[in-house]
Image (cartoon, grey):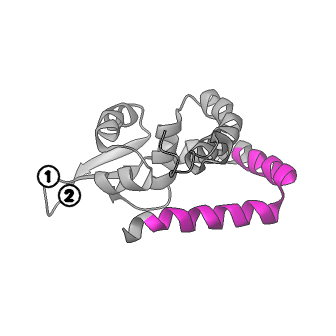
Amino acid sequence: MDQSQPPPRDTRHALPMALLRAREAVMTRFRPMLAAHDINEQQWRVIRVLGEVDSLDASEVALRANILAPSLTRMIKTMTERGLIERAKDSSDGRRVMLSIAPKGRDLLAAVAPDSAAIYRQLEAEYGPERTAQLIDLLIALAELNADA
């Protein structure tokens, strides 16, 4: 080993590992709720993104939901068949697929909202509302570093 190079950080203090552990600590609380509503994490992210807009190009949905485009392409069929989202061709560019949330998807958002809010309240009770808000702001700023690259 080259003595001039510092040793790698221990995994507890390595940013990627810490982010993964934090994500898992949060998602462990949400997964049972999602399973109870027969939806997986990626599908939930798509529903959440589409719940905020009228419609979006599929590639923009993939970007905002942090899903690889090929994965979203596979999900669109399933989610459309379940009546959670609607798909249409862009009137100005027939190659673009436009996605929107379907009424059943809005119903799912409404059904999950109370359970989701309870999980957020529990997290804030354990971690603190100020620390939670600060953490979210810091993570947003960290993610925006990628946008500038």
Please tell me which residue is depicted at 40% across the width and 67% down the height of the picture: 147
Residue 84: which quarter of the image?
top left
Magenta residue check for 67: no
Assign a secondary structure to mark 2.
loop
* Disc 1: which residue: 95
Classed neighbour count for the residue bearing mark 1: other residues with Cα under 10 Å, few (<14), some (14–19), many (≥20):
few
Can residue 142 be seen here? yes
User: With respect to residue 145, does 2 lie above or below?
Assistant: above
Residue range corresponding to the magenta coloring: 116-145
Question: Label 2 amino acid?
Answer: Asp
Q: CA distance from mark 1 to mark 2?
A: 7 Å
Please tell me which residue is depicted at 34% across the width and 58% down the height of the picture: 56
User: With respect to residue 4, does 82 lie above or below?
Assistant: above
- Looking at the image, the residue that sits furthest to the bottom is 148
Please tell me which residue is depicted at 46% across the width and 67% down the height of the picture: 145
* Disc 2: which residue: 90
Residue 49: x percent and y percent?
47, 54
Question: Label 1 amino acid?
Answer: Arg
Q: Do the numbered discs 1 and 2 sit on residues whose CB atoms are within 8 Å?
A: yes
Assign a secondary structure to mark 1.
loop
Residue 127: x percent and y percent?
82, 53
User: With respect to residue 9, does 64 lie above or below?
Assistant: below
